[in-house]
Amino acid sequence: MFISQNNKRLQKHLIGSIISALFCALFAAVYESFSFGVYSYFMLFAFVVPLLGCSLPYSIIIFRNKNIPDMLALRLWNSGIAILTVGSIIQGVIEIYGTTNHFIIIYLIAGIIFCISGLVVWFICCKQTKNTTTIKTAVFQNNDI
């Protein structure tokens, strides 16, 4: 079976997202073991963001082997997921500390903006690739006649 360079790159991103999810779970376990019985759901479930945000979509894309995102789309998407993960961990730290902060919403807004921009870049690149392949097939078909 032939594995393209883009597919190998996506596999590296998949492994990195699994490692980051494991790190978040380990970090939450260690942090909450020293928090004297106080816990936060944001801290407990911070590992879910990279797991569902990166690992699941990347696995689906690798198994389908179609429309692999380009580097800019991957970087924007990964940055958005990282921002959401860090925001979740910081919200957990603030809740465990016993206070509130209204600036946490910035993490959510920035993470969503980065994820949406990654999706937009991916769809634009997929559309351009689809248009160039239809143009190439149309040109080659007309040359054969």
Image (spheres, grey):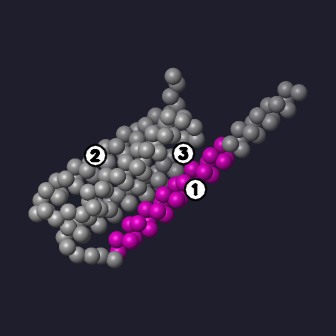
Magenta extent: 103-129
Nearer the camera: disc 3 or disc 2: 2
Task: Residue 124: say if magenta.
Answer: yes
* Mark linked to residue 70: 3
Give whichever of discs 1 and 2 has the lower sequence position: 2
Q: Residues within 10 Å of mark 3 (few under 14, many from 20)?
A: some
Place residue 84 in its image quadrant.
bottom left
Secondary element at image label 2: helix
Q: Which amino acid, by three-letter code, is at mark 3?
A: Asp
Q: Which residue is mark 1?
A: 120
Residue 74 vertical position relative to residue 36 in the rendered view, above or below: above
Give whichever of discs 3 and 2 has the lower sequence position: 2
Place residue 82 in its image quadrant.
bottom left
Q: Is residue 105 left or right of residue 134?
A: left
Q: Which amino acid, by three-letter code, is at mark 1?
A: Val
Considering every residue shown, the one lying at the far top of the view is 1
Residue depicted at x 25% and y 50%: 25
Q: Which residue is mark 2?
A: 22
Which x, y percent locates residue 70? 54, 45
Which x, y percent locates residue 7? 49, 35
